[in-house]
Amino acid sequence: LYRLNVQRNDETNLNKKRIVSLMNAINSYVVIWSEDGNMFLMNNKLKEMLKPEVLEWQSQDILPILFPQGFVNYGKSGMMLSGVKEFPLESRYGTQYVSWSSSVLIFGNDDTDRMIISIGFDITENKVIRQQLNKTNNLLAAKEKHYSLAMNLSEIGIILNEHCDEYFTISKELMDMLGIRTDSIRIYDFIELIHKDERMMFESYLKSARSNTLRIDHYNSMDLRIRSYDGKYRWYAFRYRNSPNGQYGMPVIGGAIIDISKDKEKDYLIERMAYIDE
């Protein structure tokens, strides 16, 4: 019986050496641990990453450094076995983020000798990039919100045609101003909204813009009566600039549309008062 136990222990030690050798051949963090905390093996890559003083600790103290306490309650490894886990880890190089994937490993000849093997991948760089992207997205979202609010308060709408097709892309502000339900409208249908007395002026602009005969980066404007959300014509200033689209090699057609109805009413009253005075 004694010889049988010695032989079994020798086989177990040999298996451990082979497994440690295999662990060291893996270019990732590898740890094999038992649910009762009595078994704990790390590969060299993981040891090189941990703080030197941590390596002096007992295995049951090192494990919570790798995995949060709630994920490693001895005798309850289900949390670690239920999918990939990401945890921060205080290493000798600072805070690193490690993605752990765990599975069951039967160690030795006894099927009840159940171990957990966890393989970790350093995702610190990806994590930092994701955090920076999230921060940038949040800043862009905030700027877009502020931009949208500013456009709403200033009652400025936008129409654009970047591909020389038959549609204008319009901003939400212009949708509200003109009572248009979608963010695109056929150019012909937009022209139909313009009062017939100003329609020819807008069509002349379109023709010049499409033929690229307008001065590059030169601002200009025209006053147009456009049928609005209430079915009535209101005065708008259409401010535009001819800009080439570098991506498609075609001109960008469109510009800003600003409600100037109150200014027109004021100008009309001033003219009428001047006429009465005469």
Image (cartoon, helix red, strand yellow):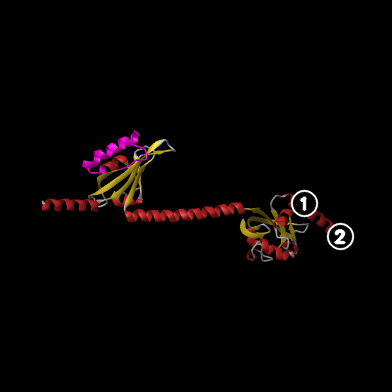
Question: Which is more N-terminal, label 1 or label 2?
Answer: 2
**Residue shown at 67%/61% (left/top)?**
66
Residue on which the image places disc 1: 21
| SS assignment at label 1 | helix
Q: Mark 2 or mark 1: which is in front?
A: 1
**Residue shown at 44%/56% (left/top)?**
142
> Residue 62 location, x and y as percent?
71, 63
Q: Quadrant of residue 54?
A: bottom right
> Residue 24 location, x and y as percent?
74, 51
- Camera-nearest residue between 13 and 263: 263
Task: Give the vertical position of 185 relative to 249 (above or below).
Answer: below
Q: Dot 2 surroundings within 10 Å: few (below 14), some, or many (20 or more)?
A: few
Q: Could you tell me the amino acid type at mark 1?
A: Ser
Number of the label disc, if any, that sits on residue 138: none
- Camera-nearest residue between 271 and 250: 271
Residue on which the image places disc 2: 6
Task: State if disc 1 and disc 2 touch (CB < 8 Å).
Answer: no
The reply, left or right, for residue 266 in relation to residue 33 is: left
Q: Dot 1 surroundings within 10 Å: few (below 14), some, or many (20 or more)?
A: few
Asked if the magenta segment contains residue 197, the reply would be yes
Q: Could you tell me the amino acid type at mark 2?
A: Val
Q: Quadrant of residue 17?
A: bottom right
Task: Give the vertical position of 207 relative to 134 (above or below).
Answer: above
Q: CA distance from mark 2 to mark 1?
A: 22 Å
In magenta, the rendered stretch is 192-220
Q: Quadrant of residue 185?
A: top left
Question: Could one spot residue 35 in this view of the protein?
Answer: no
